[in-house]
Image (tube, grey):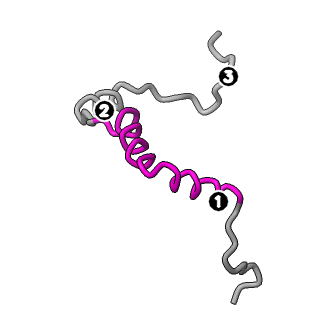
Amino acid sequence: MSIFYRPLYQSDATQFIDQLITKDPGIAVRQREGRKLLWDKPVNREAWEEYRAARVAQKPYVYSTEGK
């Protein structure tokens, strides 16, 4: 057994989240809907290939004054 084992310990943050979910069970559904709005987007693979092909290689030392 680990010396760090704390039986049935819950942090204040975990207790708060558990209470919040108990009070409002629909919060998980709204969280998933919000995630869809911001993160779950269709990816245009052809556009990404074009972006990667158009990248310009960066010099090893960004702050070089060479050539100015």
Identify which residue is drawn at 41% across, 47% down.
Answer: 26
Total marks shown come to 3
Say the numbered circle drawn on residue 57: none
The C terminus sits in image quarter: top right
Is 42 a magenta residue? no
Q: Is residue 47 above or below residue 3?
A: above
x and y percent of residue 45 in the render?
25, 36
Q: Quadrant of residue 40?
A: top left
Which amino acid does the dot numbered 2 rest on?
Answer: Trp
The residues bearing labels 3 and 2 have C-alpha atoms spaced at a distance of 29 Å
SS for callout 3: loop
The residue located at (38%, 46%) in the rendering is: 29
How would you classify the magenta stretch by its main secondary structure?
A: helix
Residue that badge 1 annotates: 15
Question: Between 62 and 2, which is closer to the camera in this rendering?
Answer: 2
Q: CA distance from mark 3 to mark 1?
A: 52 Å
Which residues lie in the magenta part?
12-41
Give the farthest residue toward the bottom: 1
Report the Cα–Cα distance between label 2 and label 1.
Answer: 42 Å
**Disc 1 element:** helix
